[in-house]
Amino acid sequence: MKILSINTGSSSIKCTLYEMPQTKILMKGSIERIGQSPALISFDFGRTRRNLKRDVADYHQGVEFFLGMLTARETQVLPSTDQIDVVGHRVVHGGQKFSQAVLINDEVMSLIKEYAEFAPLHGSPNIAAIQSCQRLLPKSFNVAVFDTALYQAIPARAYLYGLPIEMCEKQGIRRYGFHGISHSYVAKEASRLIGKRLEELRIITCHLGSGASVTAFKHGKAVDTSMGFTPLEGVLMGTRPGDLDSGIIIYILKHLGLNAEQLEELLNKDSGLKGLCGKSDMRDIIYLTEQGDEKARDALDVFVYRIQKYIGAYAAVLGGIDAVVFTGGIGENSPVLRKKILDAFGYLDVKVHEEKNLSNEAFFSTKDSSVYAMTIPANEELAIACEAFKIVSKNQSLTET
């Protein structure tokens, strides 16, 4: 079965074509800076890698480009896109309705559009990618794999907010959590590498990229996570503030004259690291810090401190930690930040092996550390493909047609 996995971000799209259930990669690629000039395109097929720069105006063009590359003469991955059986889509918000992946029909699509309001940076890209595949691949099944599904089972004490309960129930206000596809994948992978069942381990996973979140796992399930009703809550992020006194929102509305749309723009695109020092890319911030830039240093300190607070809180929730796992662009590639974060946890007997950390090894704790410190590359595309395969395989009427 050939499954195309599509992972849309706020300005990027990643696509991987798999042969399932072998999980063999037939082709993969990414487009960054969608809507900017030029977009950065890379794709791999066989042993060949290509990098391009060209304008990609929107996600419709992005999907169309990838499908064209699958059948292009230079790649010869597929004779026709009709051979794509299933498309698995990362969908950021599934509300209270979806606790697992589902086939996309008109009703599901309507709900995806409804929930898009709560994740404005990702909702529209998700919808655009699905609509493009429905139009360009009319014979393929489309499956939605939700970032929020992992957290539908967290306990009420973790998902309830201190608002009138009638309001919460009527409006669906609760902690939903995000990055669930990534957190679930790396927790399972950590369990496999450690050699113990996930149910036996207390794991804290840190997905650190432009968006960042921390999740606690106990008895094989997520029990709490840092992002909330929307992806704005939690640790400091590239352009989002993370935890924020709600009184600040009231103050801004009263005294700065911003309307709801301007406030949304401020909180989603102009806050976080960017708001504190003018830069949202951690590589730039580390460089500026090394050059003595005080604003960059403060932004870095806030980023590290917020993550430490969540790890410490979740250590209490879990009654101890067996492993701390880092993933995402920053988590996988910044030994400096991993060490800064874990230096606070000597009291839990977390010991970092300097050389292993610098070389980004899977295990970078010392042999006598009581806690595994781990780096696991994110692979949301594989997780999406596996979930899509599982959903379609369960329905015999689909696999027999």
Image (cartoon, rainbow, N blue to C red):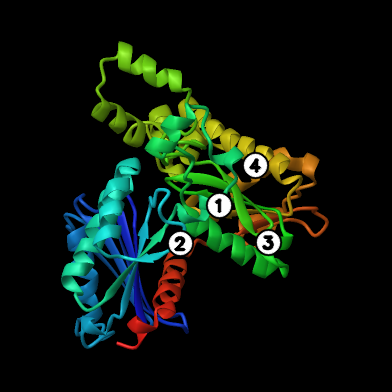
- 209 or 145, nearer to the observer: 145
* Residue denoted by label 4: 311
- C-alpha gap between disc 4 and disc 1: 20 Å
Q: Earlier in the sequence, mark 2 or mark 4?
A: 2
Three-letter code for the amino acid on which mark 1 is drawn: Ala
Q: Residues within 10 Å of mark 3 (few under 14, many from 20)?
A: many
State the image coordinates of residue 273 (x, y, percent, origin top left): 43, 34
From the viewer's perspective, is the residue at label 2 or at label 4 nearer? Answer: 2
Three-letter code for the amino acid on which mark 3 is drawn: Phe
- C-alpha gap between disc 2 and disc 1: 11 Å
Residue 148 sits above or below residue 134 on the image: above
Is 283 left or right of 129, judged from the image as shown?
right
Residue 330 sits above or below residue 303 on the image: below
State the image coordinates of residue 98 (x, y, percent, origin top left): 42, 56
* Residue denoted by label 2: 100
* Residue denoted by label 3: 363
Three-letter code for the amino acid on which mark 4 is drawn: Ile
* Disc ID at residue 57: none
* Element type at mark 4: helix
* Element type at mark 3: loop
- C-alpha gap between disc 1 and disc 3: 29 Å
- 337 or 133, nearer to the observer: 133
**Residue lying farthest right?**
368
Q: Earlier in the sequence, mark 1 or mark 3?
A: 1
Q: Residues within 10 Å of mark 1 (few under 14, many from 20)?
A: some
- 226 or 354, nearer to the observer: 226
Q: Earlier in the sequence, mark 3 or mark 2?
A: 2
* Element type at mark 2: loop
Q: Earlier in the sequence, mark 2 or mark 1?
A: 2
Q: Residue at x 31, y 11 (%)?
A: 255
